[in-house]
Image (cartoon, rainbow, N blue to C red):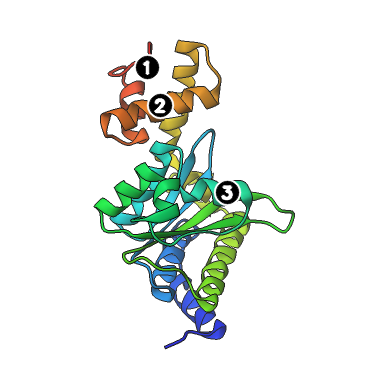
Amino acid sequence: MAVDAVRAVDVIAEVVRDAKPGETPARLCAAAVKLLPVVGASVSLRGSGMPIRLAASNSLASFLAEAQTTLGDGPWLHAYRDGTPVLACDLTAGRDLHRWPVFARQAAAVGVRAVYSMPLGSDDGLTVGTLDLYRDTPGGLTEDELRRAQLVAAVMTLALTTLPREESGSGGEEAWLAGLATEHDEVYQAIGMVMAQLGVDAEEASARLRARAFAQGRTALEVAHDVIAHRERLDGD
């Protein structure tokens, strides 16, 4: 049964009701799964050379968000760069498979056949990240489904840019958005260490970190942990 715009707004309102600021992105990912023919959703912001995964609806969505981070490629990158939705409707064959062959194989390995990436942006054309939607069968979105996906992305953008600060457990005030990305602070620290070790800029250091992670079949975050702990050096890559 078709879900009209009013119903979509009602679902979003119900899902985020009484949510603390830091809980809102994950709840909006859950709303996307309720409203669309998808099995998972994740939200990422663009960081220094790689996206920062803020929230995901489940472990599958989290895994594929991290996979795109590690590869430095995927539908999210094109949605972010172009500021328009990217609909990879069939990762098992044709144009989408050839466009992102490594990511497509990783997605297919966990049962995902299509990915829809919605840019998160403002009225001035600035794109700050993406809402990524994962489907277990090939296929596109209907016009109504695309409108619903864009509605969730618009609410997500509003949440990320306007939600108030909340009190932290230590009694001080902490930006809720920064708190969501705490684990990725280690990625930035690792990038800084690689920059110092190799005398390269942030983009090159990020690329080397991703390359090491891909070569070892790990995530960029896992490699960053080892770089900080001095268990891993990227010299000579």
Secondary element at tag 3 = helix
The quadrant of the image that shows the C terminus is: top left
Amino acid type for the residue under numbered disc 1: Leu
- Disc 2 residue crowd, few under 14, some 14–19, many 20+, Cα 10 Å: many
Whether 8 is drawn above or below 228: the answer is below
Residue 81's disc number: none
Secondary element at tag 2 = helix
Percent x, y of residue 21: 50, 59
Residue 234's disc number: 1
Whether residue 230 is visible? yes
Percent x, y of residue 99: 45, 47
Q: Which residue is mark 2?
A: 209
Residue located 54% across and 24% down the image: 202
Amino acid type for the residue under numbered disc 3: Tyr
- Looking at the image, is mark 3 or mark 1 earlier in the sequence? 3
The quadrant of the image that shows the N terminus is: bottom left
